[in-house]
Amino acid sequence: MFRFAPSPTGDMHIGNLKVAILNYILAKQNDEKFIIRIEDTDKERNIEGKDREILEILDKFDIKYDNVIYQSHNLKFHQQFASQLLMERKAFACFCSEEELERKREEAKKRKIAYRYDGTCEKLSDAEVLNNEKPFVVRIKKPTHPISFKDEIKGEFTFEPDDIDSFVILRRDKTPTYNFACAIDDMLNDISFVIRGEDHISNTPKQILIRNYIGYDKEIKYAHLPIILNKEGKKMSKRDKASSVKWLLEEGFLPEAITNYLILLGNKTPKEIFTLKEAIEWFDIKNLSKSSAKFDLDKLRFLNREHIKMLDSLNLAKRIGYHDKDIGDLAKLYTEEASTLKEIKEKISKIFSSKTPPLEFKENFDKIVESIKKAPHFEEFDDFKKYITETTSLKGKNLFKPLRIALTGEEHGPNLSDIYAHIKNYLPEIVK
Ligand code: GLU
């Protein structure tokens, strides 16, 4: 079983989408199930509606899943396993106050050493615990030996007991922390392979420790994806608009092109332009680079143009709000100068809007408009052009510039004869 485990705490980041896509590809390749687990146990950070938004995005990207699980529904299991660990003395109640812990953290900082939990409450006897009325968190005992795991992309990692530390598994309100809920749920969901961002590498030994203590011995494979960098070589954050999947979609990037780009980024692929279906045939996690790659919007714009050209024309027309194959064909003519659906839509809506020519073309423009209004239907551009030339006595630049403005609202653009082929049935709506 594979899983994608987003937290409903903000707009989906492209790094997260990449995680979802790769999990989906590997689940398909291995003929295993794929679930979505909404990690909603941190109530303070949850944002209403973000879970639905995540599922809608997955739909748009054609990422199919077998089930959706809300982590908060597993609370009783998280608490049961925490009780088990407490009884087996693999975890302990910790009454240290936030202020006390903060003071110790500050002290460690002053002494320039890494802060670690000092074990104060680990030594409490049962009687001392039972007689203490203060609220407590539950901490897991740090391991006695180092914990190692092999990452499918980055290789071998080993963490010392002190790096893992006696960390909190249940908060004071008895809700699980991320590491605990995640480790338990990966076990309950029978996950075989975890693919996630590299910011979770230091969490992995903690999650392995939890399952070791519980006595779960199925080995889970791990692959941690390098973070995606911005132009400056820094981690792409909310300040980089292109880090938000929602923003990219609003800008008119096709899900197909974004998918292509995210699979291509930091990877060795047999080709540059491909569909998700094709990638399932040849994707190999071993070809992913260990190090981070920079996000390049121009490259995405290029791929977007290519995917726009690959779309069926009626489908393309629908994506920009029309229902006619001709508009899709017309849209494709604009992929030379426009890269996104938004930019193409602007071009098409200029064609259907009322036009105001620059003063220098005004007189000839008016003549041409009058002539088009009276013209019969012509199948061929040459016949149409001949009619306009004859009825207006205009030719050369005097004809073509204002004619182009009358038909497209712009002074430059694709060949008029190519455009004409797709707008000839709309002339009364275009020239009003
Ligand atoms: N909710 C975590 C995140 O969004 C999931 C990490 C994981 O896949 O375990 O980063």
Image: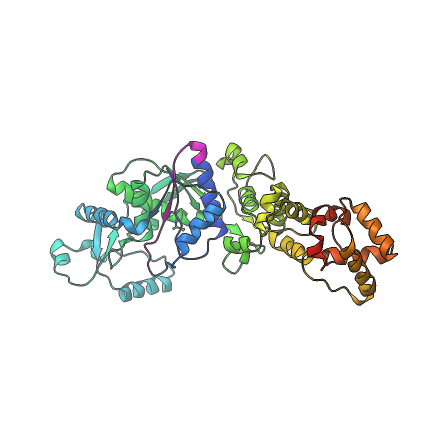
Residue at 25% from the left image edge and 42% from the top image edge: 213
Q: Is residue 387 left or right of residue 23?
A: right
Q: Is residue 341 left or right of residue 28?
A: right
Q: Is residue 374 left or right of residue 70?
A: right
Q: Position of residue 118 (x, y in %)?
A: 27, 57
Closer to the camera in the image, 208 or 105: 208
Which quarter of the figure has residue 359? bottom right
Closer to the camera in the image, 276 or 432: 432
Q: Which residues are magenta?
A: 28-43
Q: Position of residue 163 (x, y in %)?
A: 35, 50
Residue at 28% from the left image edge and 67% from the top image edge: 99
Q: Position of residue 129 (x, y in %)?
A: 15, 57
Q: Quadrant of the C terminus?
A: bottom right
Asked if residue 39 is among those painted magenta in the image, a careful observer would answer: yes
Number of numbered discs visible in the structure rendering: 0
Note whether residue 235 is visible. Answer: no
Q: Is residue 407 above or below residue 281?
A: below
Q: Is residue 302 left or right of residue 1?
A: right
